[in-house]
Image (tube, grey):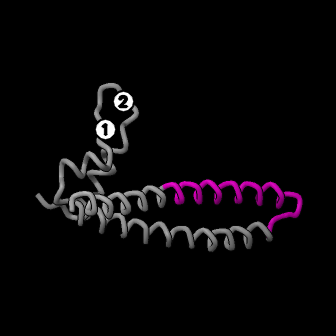
Amino acid sequence: MTLTNEEWMKLVWESSKLPDSVSRDFTPIQSFAELLEIFPDAAPAAKRAARLRIKQLTEAMSGLSDLREVWSSIINKEDFRKQAGLIEYSNKQIEEKRDKIEKELKQCYFQLEYIRNLGKLTS
């Protein structure tokens, strides 16, 4: 069974997220490695999906600098007494977004590395 990029991304996403109403004790969550064991033919699709996601996340990371510039131009128009609080708030928001992007990038790079090493182990 071969999976498309979209099917693979959906499968990985659904396995990594649980609804708030479901207890983790009763719902098995498959790891990336377990999913590849279940669907061994999906490795190329998983590789493509990880590369695509890395590209999207890299673009999002570069978009944060644009966001910072836009917020700075807006903040500079405000009263100087409000600027310090607004700058602190915008920096906090951008840092939180950057941390989330970096975390997901690390996960995607790990998945790519795992797939590469999987090929070496089976050879």
Q: Nearer the viewer, residue 98 or 41?
A: 41
**How many residues crowd around disc 1 within 10 Å: few (fewer than 14), some, or many (20 or more)?**
some
**Residue 66 versus residue 33 in the image, above or below:** below
Between the C-alphas of marks 2 and 1, the distance is 8 Å
- Rendered-image quadrant of the N terminus: bottom left
**Residue 52 versus residue 96 in the image, above or below:** below
Residue 24 - label:
2
Q: Quadrant of residue 110?
A: bottom left
| Percent x, y of residue 57 | 47, 66
Which residue does the image show at 28% across and 62% down from the upper left?
A: 120
What span is colored magenta in the figure?
A: 77-103
Query: Which numbered disc flags the more N-terminal residue, 2 or 1?
Result: 2
- Which residue occupies the extreme right position in the image? 81
Which residue does the image show at 36% across and 37% down from the upper left?
A: 19
Query: Is 49 on the left or on the right of 76, as rendered?
Result: left
Q: Quadrant of residue 78?
A: bottom right
Q: Amino acid at mark 1?
A: Ile
- Rendered-image quadrant of the C terminus: bottom left
**How many residues crowd around disc 2 within 10 Å: few (fewer than 14), some, or many (20 or more)?**
few
Query: Is 93 on the left or on the right of 118, as rendered?
Result: right
Query: Is 81 on the left or on the right of 122, as rendered?
Result: right
**Element type at marker 1?**
loop
